[in-house]
């Protein structure tokens, strides 16, 4: 499965999974998608 992210964050995506049984009974052909993302944030210094 695919998840769209900006090029800057593409190394942050760890794992992507589709849960096919999560939408039973709704009548749709879409599936619930879950992504594990690790962000490395920088601190902003106060001036």
Image: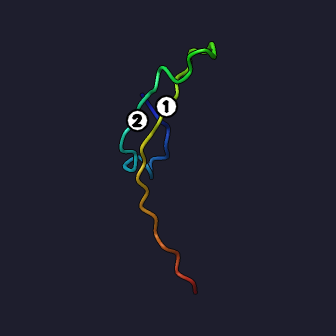
In the rendered image, residue 11, in percent from the top left (x then y), is placed at: 36, 49
Q: Nearer the viewer, residue 43 or 23?
A: 23
Residue found 63% across the figure and 17% down from its top: 26
* Contact (Cβ within 8 Å) of mark 1 with mark 2: yes
* Left or right of residue 43: residue 46: right
Is disc 2 placed on a helix, strand or loop? strand
Say whether disc 1 or disc 2 marks the residue closer to the N-terminus: 2
In the rendered image, residue 44, in percent from the top left (x then y), is placed at: 52, 75
Q: Nearer the viewer, residue 46 or 38?
A: 38
Real-space CA distance between mark 1 and mark 2, rounded to the nearest whole angstrom? 7 Å
Residue found 46% across the figure and 69% down from its top: 42
Q: Which mark is residue 33?
A: 1
Quarter the C terminus occupies: bottom right
Disc 1 crowd rating (10 Å Cα; few below 14, some 14-19, many 20+) is: some
* Vertical position of residue 22 compared to residue 4: above or below: above
The residue that mark 2 highlights is 16
């Amino acid at each position: 499965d695919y998840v769209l992210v900006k090029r800057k964050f593409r190394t942050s995506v760890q794992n992507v999974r589709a849960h096919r049984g999560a939408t039973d009974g709704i009548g749709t052909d879409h599936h619930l998608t879950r992504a594990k993302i690790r962000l490395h944030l920088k601190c902003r210094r106060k001036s």
